[in-house]
């Protein structure tokens, strides 16, 4: 390849990188920008192999495959909450690569044969090699420290050692000194020691400068490290005479530095003050006026008689609101609540409310952190507004919902002089008439400045604790009618397993081998989620020999995505059974058998068991009352009080319990007039539901709403499956891809041949945007394009709910007789997302 063509291609690839970075600055084009930059990177690798004539070197391809495999694995396994530390780690890898290139260039290994930089300009080559080495090592070590702080393996608070500033300056001077020593040939001082000194002191400098940066300042630090990785790459390109590496590294370095400056300006902080961990603590001497106002308002209210008004709740405020702004923060990231936020937004939108998101530039732990999380939950990009664009609208909105944000909406930033956030532009949340704050607690944010919003006398609703639970509670409040004029209390209903769990505040679940046999781990998770949504603390007690292998229960519960922090070993939880409200046993016997304490001569005598019998209420979901593997009768089965036996298949028992939890327990009320059947009421009563997705689901991008409906059904004890027609959509596996995006469990997806015989036995079918693939006319309409095509036997189902855009024929142009079936068909026409939201609303109506 001629140098001219090479330079032209280098310019084009550099422009692609520049364009990609520019596109990533806007939400709408960010994905395309990322793709464009990745393609440019691939092009750069191929161009380098071609120009340097190293295509025959087969070892290169081995390392390319290894690198691609590592990248692919990390992309699949790293969760969104871990993305900041992932970015920090990638910055470090870039720095390490530059340092390695610097070392090789100093050792004259792999110098580009097409240029004579190394031979013609030895001082320049050695200087750039030493700079690449030192800047690369600073980036690597600094990035590893940043990743460690973000991953909480290192302290998140600034770590300041004795004489920290002086030592940091000294290390920087020594690093520069060794760069100079390595750049010039000094007799009696081998280059080897210059390289060792540069490596050692630059690494220490990276450690000292990054360790004292606090966790909340990590967005700026990561941005700076990103810039340094680009600078290191550009210097490495100079060392080896690679113009493309110089250009791309320069672009990355400049863009990173610009982003760092923008973020510093947004926080009203100087970069050096962040790196030096300087900043005063809060003094809240300016909150007294708010107290005076509150007292005056109290006197005014006392002068008027209290109306018989239903107490206002966060849910009732949002139910009546026409304009709502959502403010996400780092707490949303910690709670992984972005999908719940999206569900709340969808619920508001379905109610006719305008929903927008206010994004502070430094919210989170990396640049664009909130955008990434909300993008993961498929929040429409046009609903995301930067601070400057939306800050004037808070006074005109009806309500604001804050999820895990503090410093970025702290009004004290405007007047609390001497505090770290003084002068920082913040979101004008305090201008809104109603503010709902879903934060974990009332502690100050990272800056340590008390937030006066927490003590505002009116218009503030505090929802403390886990953000997901708070959002679920708000949505539950939105469904409430607000009618407190209840009739006289009915006669007390008989206690059931469901009523016990409905009233419980602390529940321990004990899984056993029976759960494994019934494959009931997903239903166990559903029950736990239902309890958690009711405000119940749920934990799992794991006996070390439960199941048929070490860790058997852990594996099964992990498969159902049970959070590992809810799993407790026997020794850690055994003392808590007496304090819990209820225990749910699923398929366990010997490991909870109290006879092990006193039945001498039996196989289990002396074996440590779970103290389930200490609990006041025990719900046992076992297949039968036979003794366990050891053959010893369990006295729990015959305890006079506080034991509920649910015998048979564990999945069915759990479904029954969840149904009991939904029951009101009032059997004395007269039977109401039968309500008109709706799609929602059909699904509410259904035990088996099949969902049929089609191309209309893809067009409406309704896969997440489909998953929400399935979760709602599953929480009601309904068995949900998906019927996948092989040609549904516009490419092979189209439906699988979309449902996978919504995290639908793959074991719920069934091919046509495997599920077609089950439509007659199901209670209801929900069709989302499918037509030709379930058109019964394919069996008899000779001469039509679909005649003879195998279709899904949807028409065999007793109840069919069709969420299609309209009643027009499908792509084949053949009318579907299901649309005109006399009974058992519910047509929900229009946008599929709106139709699904309407169905879920109908399900909530009793």
Image: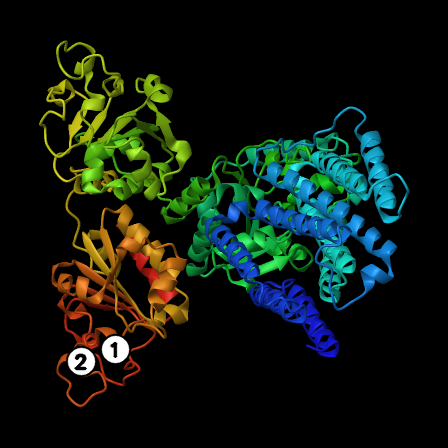
Q: Is residue 107 above or below residue 516?
A: below
Q: In percent of the image, x 77 and y 51: which residue is there?
A: 106
Badges 2 and 1: C-beta atoms under 8 Å apart?
yes
Viewer-side residue, 810 vs 444:
810
Q: Which mark is residue 772?
A: 1
Total count of labels: 2
Cα distance between the residues tagged 2 and 1: 8 Å
Image-based side of 668 in relation to 559, left or right: left
Q: Residue 508: horizontal and vertical position, in percent?
A: 31, 28
Q: In percent of the image, x 36 and y 43: which residue is there?
A: 561
Q: Residue 358: horizontal and vertical position, in percent?
A: 60, 54
Q: In percent of the image, x 72 and y 62: which residue is there?
A: 245
Image-based side of 373 in relation to 539, left or right: right
Q: Is residue 41 visible?
A: yes
Labels 2 and 1: the sequence-earlier one? 1
Density class for disc 1 (Cα within 10 Å; few <14, some 14-19, many ≥20) is many
- Which residue carries the number 2 mark? 778
Q: Secondary structure at mark 1?
A: helix
Q: Residue 284: horizontal and vertical position, in percent?
A: 72, 30
Q: Secondary structure at mark 2?
A: helix
């Amino acid at each position: 390849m001629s140098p001219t063509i090479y330079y032209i291609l280098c310019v084009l690839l550099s422009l692609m990188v520049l364009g990609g970075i520019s596109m990533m600055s806007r939400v709408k084009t960010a994905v395309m920008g990322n793709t464009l930059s990745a393609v440019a990177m691939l092009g750069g690798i191929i161009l380098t192999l071609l120009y340097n004539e190293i295509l025959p070197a087969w070892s290169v391809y081995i390392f390319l495959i290894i690198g691609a495999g590592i990248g692919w694995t990390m992309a699949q396994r790293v969760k969104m909450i871990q993305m900041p530390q992932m970015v920090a780690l990638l910055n470090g890898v870039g720095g390490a690569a530059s340092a390695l290139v610097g070392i090789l260039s100093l050792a004259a290994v792999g110098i580009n044969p097409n240029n004579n930089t190394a031979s013609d300009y030895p001082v320049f080559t050695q200087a750039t090699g030493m700079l690449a080495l030192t800047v690369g090592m600073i980036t690597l070590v600094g990035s590893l420290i940043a990743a460690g702080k973000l991953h909480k393996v290192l302290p998140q608070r600034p770590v300041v050692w004795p004489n920290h500033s002086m030592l940091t300056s000294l290390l920087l001077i020594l690093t520069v000194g060794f760069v100079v020593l390595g750049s010039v040939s000094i007799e009696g001082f081998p280059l080897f020691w210059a390289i060792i000194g540069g490596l050692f002191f630059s690494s220490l400098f990276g450690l000292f400068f990054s360790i004292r940066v606090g966790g909340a300042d990590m967005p700026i630090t990561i941005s700076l490290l990103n810039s340094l990785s680009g600078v290191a790459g550009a210097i490495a390109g100079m060392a080896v005479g690679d113009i493309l590496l110089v250009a791309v590294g320069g672009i990355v370095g400049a863009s990173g530095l610009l982003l760092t400056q923008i973020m510093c300006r947004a926080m009203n902080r100087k970069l050096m003050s962040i790196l030096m961990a300087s900043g005063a603590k809060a003094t809240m001497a300016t909150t007294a006026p708010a107290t005076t106002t509150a007292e005056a308002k109290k006197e005014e209210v006392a002068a008027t008689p209290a109306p018989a008004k239903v107490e206002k709740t966060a849910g009732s405020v949002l139910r009546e609101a026409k304009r709502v702004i959502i403010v996400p923060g780092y707490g949303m990231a910690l709670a992984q609540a972005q999908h719940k936020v999206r569900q709340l937004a969808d619920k508001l939108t379905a109610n006719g409310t305008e929903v927008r998101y206010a994004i502070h530039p430094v919210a989170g732990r990396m640049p664009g952190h909130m955008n990434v999380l909300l993008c993961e939950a498929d929040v429409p990009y046009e609903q995301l507004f930067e601070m400057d664009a939306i800050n004037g609208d808070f006074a005109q909105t009806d309500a604001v919902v804050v999820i895990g944000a503090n410093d970025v909406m702290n009004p004290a930033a405007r007047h609390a002089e001497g505090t770290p956030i003084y002068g920082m532009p913040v979101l004008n949340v305090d201008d809104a008439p109603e503010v709902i704050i879903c934060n974990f607690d009332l502690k100050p944010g990272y800056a340590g400045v008390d937030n006066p919003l927490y003590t505002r006398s009116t218009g503030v609703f505090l929802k403390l604790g886990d953000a997901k639970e708070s959002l679920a509670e708000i949505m539950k409040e939105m469904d409430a009618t607000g009618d407190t004029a209840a009739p006289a209390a009915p006669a007390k209903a008989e206690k059931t397993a469901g009523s016990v769990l409905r009233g419980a505040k602390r529940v321990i679940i004990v899984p056993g081998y029976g759960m494994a046999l019934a494959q009931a781990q997903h239903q166990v998770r559903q029950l736990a989620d239902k309890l958690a949504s009711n405000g119940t603390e749920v934990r799992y007690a794991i006996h070390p020999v439960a199941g048929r292998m070490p860790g058997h229960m852990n594996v099964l519960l992990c498969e159902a995505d049970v959070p590992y922090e809810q799993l407790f070993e026997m020794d850690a939880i055994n003392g808590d059974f007496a304090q819990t409200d209820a225990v749910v046993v699923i398929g366990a016997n010997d490991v909870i058998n109290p006879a092990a304490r006193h039945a001498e001569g039996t196989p289990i005598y002396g074996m440590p068991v779970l103290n389930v019998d200490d609990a006041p209420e025990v719900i046992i979901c076992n297949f039968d009352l036979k003794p366990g593997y050891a053959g010893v009768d369990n006295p729990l089965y015959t305890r006079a009080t506080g034991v509920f036996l649910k015998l048979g298949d564990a999945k069915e028992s759990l479904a029954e319990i969840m149904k009991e939890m939904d029951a009101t327990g009032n059997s004395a009320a007269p039977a109401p007039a039968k309500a008109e059947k709706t799609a929602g009421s059909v699904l509410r009563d259904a035990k088996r539901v099949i969902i049929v997705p089609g191309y209309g689901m893809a067009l409406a991008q309704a896969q997440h709403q489909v998953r929400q409906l399935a979760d709602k059904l599953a929480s009601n004890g309904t068995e949900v499956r998906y019927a996948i027609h092989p040609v549904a959509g516009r490419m092979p596996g189209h439906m699988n891809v979309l449902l996978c995006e919504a995290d639908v469990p793959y074991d719920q997806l069934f091919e046509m041949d495997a599920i077609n015989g089950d439509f007659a036995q199901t209670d209801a079918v929900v069709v989302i945007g499918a037509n030709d693939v379930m058109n019964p006319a394919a069996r008899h309409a000779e001469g039509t394009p679909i005649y003879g095509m195998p279709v899904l036997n949807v028409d065999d189902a007793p109840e069919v709910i069709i969420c299609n855009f309209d009643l027009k024929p499908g792509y084949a142009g053949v009318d579907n007789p299901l649309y005109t079936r006399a009974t058992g068909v519910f047509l929900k026409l229009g946008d599929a997302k709106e139709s699904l939201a309407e169905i879920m609303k109908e399900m909530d109506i009793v």
